[in-house]
Amino acid sequence: MEICMRRWNARKIVCRPRGLFVVLIAGILAGQVAEAAGTSNRDELRLPQSLQPRSLSRVVSEEAAARLSAPLSVLYDVRSAADERQQAAEALRSLVQEEAFQPLRSAILRRVDLVSAGIAASAVEGLTPEQREAIQNIVAAASRYEDTCSEADAETVRAAWLNLRENEAVMTVLRPVFMTHYFNHNMHVTVSEPLLARFVSDYETREGTVAECILGAWVTGTQVTTASVSADIRRSTDQGHFILRLNGKTLSNTRGRRRPATIYTRGTHTFQIDAPVYFDGRTLTSGPARMDVNTHNQTVGVRSDYDGVPLLGPLVRKMARKKAAEKRPQSEYIAAQKIARQALPEFVDQVNERFAEANRSIQEELFDGLNRKGVGPDSLSCRSSESHLAISSRTIGGARLGGTVQPIAPLPAGVAIQLHQTAINNLIDGLEMNGREIPEDQFFEQVGQAFRDLLQRDISLFSGDDEDAAEEKEGDDPPATFLLNDIDPIRIRVEDDVLVLILQAGVVQEGRDPIPQHRIEVPIGIGVEDGSIVLTPPERLSEIRTVALEKVPALKRASVANQIRRIIRSRLPKRTVDGVVSIQASDTKTIDLQTVELSSRDGWLYIELQ
């Protein structure tokens, strides 16, 4: 029997007919063996899908992709010598600094740091066989996690980390890489000062009467006080810091009676109260408030009891004006004291009351629900500049991974949210969708209900769009029920302007053979059009990738895969979601924010609202 001969130089495979038949049979048998073997080679280091030549050429030119592929192949080849692999790492670090590789720079440098650190850690003297295996596992699983977002890979990384942390020499090599690229914060929120001012802003007008004895005169009249609240963000490196500022103005018209004259006075008094506010990501606290008052009284008229008497009337009025001028500093001081006694305690009480309510909402409506599901943030960091306040959080728990280095982004005019795919997937873990059987017409409703349970607030996913999905289904296609896997049933991978929806599920349709569990990857384009968020499904069925998780007869694999693709594609129409987000700022005020940008790159989703 003749065999295939591989011509490596020409990169072609030449087979004679009987040899081709043997190769086909061997391929089928090899597939069955690999399927039966499961994940026996799971912990081998392999070049990530996103760094393979075909994936690279989608982002950069074919020539640039080819320049990257050679050193990447050496770096990931565990059979190559350690010094050769480290040389490849240095070559890649230098290569990606060129402008042509800017879109791939952070993704490649992250992988280079990981594999290079693994090589260096493996060279530490005195390693036990278990530690050497743990180094191999942690590097392979972290590299693989970039593509899979798998709970199993995350658990492998965390278990290996616990295994290795006793070895300080190994940790000296691995810790900087993992803390930077895999255990970092995975959500960042940046709020501008104008938007913060919209949330805290308030305006009030009060009218009142005056009737009291001041400096021996009985003073009566009216006054009107207006006050507005704003925010002024201040620089701080260890917590968020801003000034809650109240600007007030009191206008008064009074008459002071002391025989034998009546003095008419117009008062214009301004005051400012500054209360420092600090935010550590969980709690708002305020410091001692400080108040400045500027008072001004102007005499606008004088009447005397002797106005009808020649000479005496003008003389009494002149004396009264002179007396009023002498006492003006005292009267203004008294007015300032009065304003301070009334306004300052009331403002402090209102601030404390509002912050107590805000802190209760943060704890009970946000953190309690997340913590109850095991997906609450375990690290929070706040800071502020002169114009923006930033909050970073990390949710990884004991068996998950975190984000990478925060991408550089322009400061927003409103609010910018940067979500790493690990934050999204860790949140999905809290939905507890594992092992559920969900009819297709209930899928989004059940996911929405899970989000409502998790976040303790009303959330509706794609309301009203299910009719559009039904119209796209084939006429004879029976309803489907999704049998979600017990592990990683729903995952999201964030790529360049694409969210890859990953389902691990089987499908049951009435009158048809059940489809075994598969890993299904569906790329969904994202963007903003006319103020609405647009989610665009793949145009071609071939863009939906499927991998069998259970045994499927070799001759049926292609047909089953295509059946899954048709089922998924027909149920994912182009969807348009309202880009306006309404936020309850207080009991009486709701702020509407419009989505102005939605983009993604290298694992990060960027959302900006104004």
Image (tube, rainbow, N blue to C red):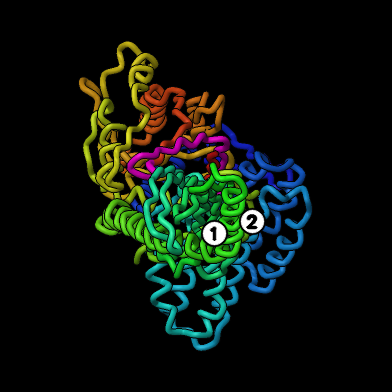
- The disc at residue 404 is 1
Measuring from the top left, give residue 487's x and y in whole percent.
Answer: 30, 50
Q: Which residues are magenta?
A: 584-603
The residue lying at 47 percent from left, 48 percent from top is: 254
Q: Secondary structure at mark 2?
A: helix
The residue lying at 40 percent from left, 31 percent from top is: 561
Contact flag, marks 2 and 1 (Cβ < 8 Å): yes
Is the C terminus in the top left, top right, bottom left or bottom right quadrant?
top right
- The disc at residue 106 is 2
Q: Nearer the viewer, residue 608 or 237?
A: 237
The answer to whether 540 is drawn above or below residue 323 in the figure is: above
Can see residue 340? yes
Measuring from the top left, give residue 403's x and y in whole percent.
Answer: 50, 58
The residue lying at 46 percent from left, 84 percent from top is: 167
- The disc at residue 548 is none
The residue lying at 59 percent from left, 58 percent from top is: 319
Measuring from the top left, give residue 370's x and y in whole percent.
Answer: 30, 55
Measuring from the top left, give residue 507's x and y in whole percent.
Answer: 28, 32
The crowding category of the residue bearing disc 1, from other C-alpha atoms within 10 Å (few below 14, some 14 to 19, many at least 20), is many
The answer to whether 527 is drawn above or below residue 477 in the figure is: below
